[in-house]
Amino acid sequence: METAADSGRLAAMRHAMVASQLRTNSVNDPRLVAVMARVPRERFLPAEVGALAYRDTAVPLGNGRYANLPIATGRLLAMAQIAPNDHVLLIGAAGGYTAAVVAELCGSVVAVESDPLLASHARQALSDFPNVTLVEGPLGKGAADHGPYDVLVIDGAVAQLPDVLADQVKIGGRVVTGLVDNGVTRLATGCRSAGGFGLVDFADIDCVCLPGFTRTAAFVF
């Protein structure tokens, strides 16, 4: 059971995360910073790793999954420029932390998680967030039934953004994601237009890799 001393210590660590990891790495949006300083990340992690909530490393969640680094999540959300009325699709809900942060910034969020144990944890941890809909299913398929979306946030690195996810974003909608290429991860952003969709890298940052995404093999003559 968490004591008052534990709560105070974790709150101090949360504010230190904001000051030393986020503000020093271009996460300066006042709304986002305020939310990340308020939402208790430890609540969305397994109890045995709650003490690691504010370290600048990936946190193990079991079954080969990891919670994304705070700086990677922060940079992705800062670039997404989420507005109060936006309808957001979040891929890689994990224990629910990023869904909780996004829920404080937007009108509604649909969070997709493929791991049954993580989905169960997230469902319970997000019970106080009525504007979050948790969908348990393959990350690469998204949640088309709840779309279309103003913003797509992939809270981790993927080998390639599937067309099926990009197609769930409204024309003019924004996408932020991590990308992995030969073991190197970077963050990227893009905007869907009537003529197509593309991504542009904006930061080389460690980012956890999400399962269920593969790169389509290039055609060779």
Image: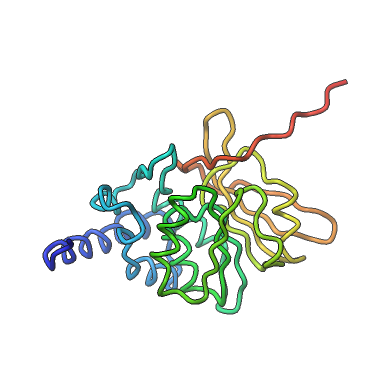
The residue at the point 56 percent across, 67 percent down is 81
Tell me where residue 120 sits by quadrant: bottom left
Asked if residue 137 lies left or right of residue 47, the reply is right
The residue at the point 42 percent across, 65 percent down is 28
Number of numbered discs overlaid on the protein picture: 0
Percent of width and height locating residue 148: 72, 67
Quadrant in the picture for the C terminus: top right
The residue at the point 43 percent across, 60 percent down is 122
Tell me where residue 152 sits by quadrant: bottom right
The residue at the point 34 percent across, 54 percent down is 45
Percent of width and height locating residue 189: 62, 53
Outermost residue, right direction?
221
Vertical comparison of 117 with 126: above or below:
above
Outermost residue, top direction?
221
Percent of width and height locating residue 77: 51, 61
Q: What colouring does the structure picture have?
A: rainbow
Percent of width and height locating residue 78: 50, 62
